[in-house]
Amino acid sequence: MKNGVYNAVEQAIVDEVNNIISPATAANKTVNVPVATQDAIRNFTEWVDPWNPLFKDGTIAPPHFLESVNSLTVWPPHPAEGFLDHDYAGDYFEYDRPIRAGDSFTVSRSRNIIEDISEQVGDGLRHFAFCNNFCDVFDAAGRRVGRSETLVGLTLRPQPNVPDPDQFPYSDHIYTPEEWEYINSIIDGEQIRGQKPRYWEDVRLGEKITPVTIGPTTIWDMVAFCAARHEIPFHPSRFFRSLPGGGGLIEDEITHNTFVPLCWHFSAERSRLVGNARPFNFGGSGANQMLRLATNWCGDDGQVRVLNWRHVTRTHHGDCTIGYGRVVRKYKRGDEYCVDIQVFLLNECRGNLSETAVITVALPTRASAQELEKGFGEMDINQGFQAGDKVRISGLPEYVFPTGYPLAGAEGIVQYRFQWQAADFHPFGGYTSLKITKHDKPLSMGNVVAVPTDLLEKI
């Protein structure tokens, strides 16, 4: 398969996507939340972080309120033949200024990008990296508040890629009393730094961040999150049907009813139509869980500056993800002294990573610049695994359910981390994708999983 050489169906997809990412669409000035009212901030905080006193009164917004302001993910329609798999792959956010009640916003969008990465993936399917919503947000004074970029993977398949239930029997996790005790210990042990400053010079490379969880999640968690972030208006389906092109609704080929795509997060029938065993969490809910690691840890005087995160795989309702992190870099960024935190969400029920990120935080200092420079440093979190390497999951993590780590001792072959890796504009390490070839426990999520790289050894 050669990049740029397409059959009629593939060419139609390319034409549709190029139309979607035309300069006219890129110049769209739509702002989801034009004014950060106290109620809007409070409503967002109700789901994202109702525990941190800094955000509870709606005066200061959690960092990722920026997503509510400028979210404009666009999806090309399904082709006349075959199935176009849309894989929301993550975002890159920069946060320049805290958002406060009363702030108003304008946006500036750049032309978006599509890249054919079929040859790099090499599985005989047509793959694209679709990068959209390159967006800068400004306040009423013309100061940039932040920036976002969204990365989506597109794969043309003959039909939806539904896991074989006989080969990968997915079932609800049955929680033991010991596991609930563990989950509650994570909840009880959550530490919010608050008004006590965390000084840059006191931070050590490898320092671990206290874990956090929102799980086990249910459909209620996702309905609440959808309402909190204002991604789309809560109009009746009839409203969307009246829009040009059907408002992006997807038709059920059996019933011929149409539904809002986000229904796949809530309905088993709708999720199966797009290749999923059952409803699954919003990737953005995981991004906010990872950000909570950072805001808990850095305190009120610290500022989150960058969230570079990847939605590794979907987490179905009922599973429990716990977020972990550690400091991997200390350096100066502009006039600020920053740390990079490597974070990830581990699906405790299945053993795989669901989301991973590097978060940059600016911290206050009390020492002289000359003294601070002595603290610069960086950990190697890549460890040099290449596609095709045979590995074993041998370093058992300390962050596991009392019933054990489901992937302990499993063996596999290193894969491309993601199908869109070749077009990733902000790459980072610390995690590796495997095709599992040998395992002791059933693989209910499929045989391609991502795990922390430091758990692997070559065999």
Image (tube, rainbow, N blue to C red):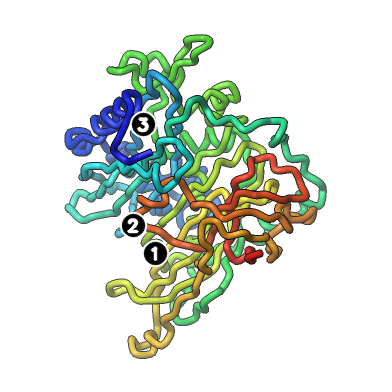
Q: Residue furthest right?
A: 177
Mark with earlier residue (1, 3): 3
Mark with earlier residue (3, 2): 3
- Residue occupying the point 33% across, 53% down: 99
**Hey, what amino acid is under mark 1?**
Gln
Q: Name the residue under label 3.
A: 75
Quadrant where the C terminus sits is bottom right
At which x and y percent is residue 263?
50, 26
Q: Which mark is residue 95?
A: 2
Residue 106 visible within the image: no
**Hey, what amino acid is under mark 2?**
Tyr
Q: In this view, does 84 lie to the left or right of 406?
A: left
Residue in the foreground of this view, choosing between 179 and 193: 179
**Hey, what amino acid is under mark 3?**
Trp
Q: Name the residue under label 1.
A: 303
Residue 332: image quadrant is bottom left
Q: In this view, does 431 lie to the left or right of 130?
A: right
Q: How far apart are marks 1 and 3 (CA)?
A: 32 Å
Q: Residue furthest front?
A: 1
At which x and y percent is residue 449?
60, 49
Above or below — where is 158 with respect to 192? above
- Residue occupying the point 42% across, 39% down: 229
Q: How far apart are marks 3 and 2 (CA)?
A: 25 Å
Residues at circles 2 and 1 in contact by the CB criterion of under 8 Å:
yes
- Residue occupying the point 67% across, 38% down: 318
